[in-house]
Amino acid sequence: MPDPAPPDAAPVARYRMAGAAMLAVWLFHAWEHTRHGTLWELYWACNMSVLFTGFAALAGWRRGIGMGVCMLAFGAPLWIIDLISTGDFFFGSLLTHFGVPLLGVWSLRPGGWPAGTTLPATAVLIGFMLISRLTTPPEMNINLVFRIYPGWEHLFPNHAAYLGFLAGIGTGLFWVTGAALGRLLKRQDAA
């Protein structure tokens, strides 16, 4: 069901500006990965979330923007863990994990936080994981869909349990993010 129309043109302009900026972040990050020969990295859920959120903003789809913010809130701590473990840093990753969610929150502020983001965000995240499983090389382990993150193997009996853990933690964090931003921004009725 589509979101209700904003009461005036100001929020629409905000959505469009935010969406254009989000897509510019994705293009910049894609350029970085092209230069380094690491294009597969664009399949990470956070990078796909930037595209998702950017197009949702351009379309004025508030719930889609909220879903993207939730997914990026989940990805930021995982990116920090990976950054500490590997030392691989791209400026576009910083913009992806912190700039894009801030743009999303900024774009939603006039209309409030859209209700009903948790379960749809979980479904989209699982969809991103399926895309990665079907289209990326196993050795890349994009979105951790082929094996447990190195060093965490002793914590899980098998890969399925690990994926279930990630989906559960993601869903919980999506709910917490929505609840916190719903209080901060004033919650809107379910659309």
Image (spheres, helix red, strand yellow):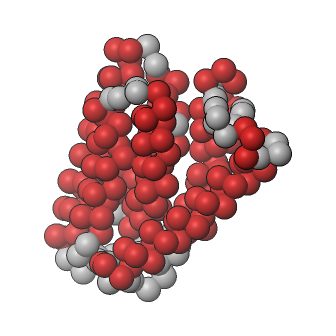
Q: Position of residue 7 (x, y in %)?
A: 24, 80
63 lies above or below 130: below
Q: Residue furthest right?
A: 157
Residue for point 24% across, 46% down? 21
55 lies above or below 130: below
Q: Position of residue 14 (x, y in %)?
A: 21, 62
Q: Position of residue 3 (x, y in %)?
A: 42, 73
Q: Is residue 27 visible?
A: no
Side (left or right) of 79 relative to 102: right
Residue for point 26% across, 38% down? 24
Nearest the viewer among 168 and 64 is 168
137 lies above or below 179: above
Q: Residue furthest left?
A: 10
Side (left or right) of 47 relative to 149: left
Residue for point 47% across, 27% down? 86
| Count of numbered circles on the image | 0
Side (left or right) of 9 relative to 6: left
Nearest the viewer among 187 and 162 is 162
Residue for point 31% across, 40% down? 94
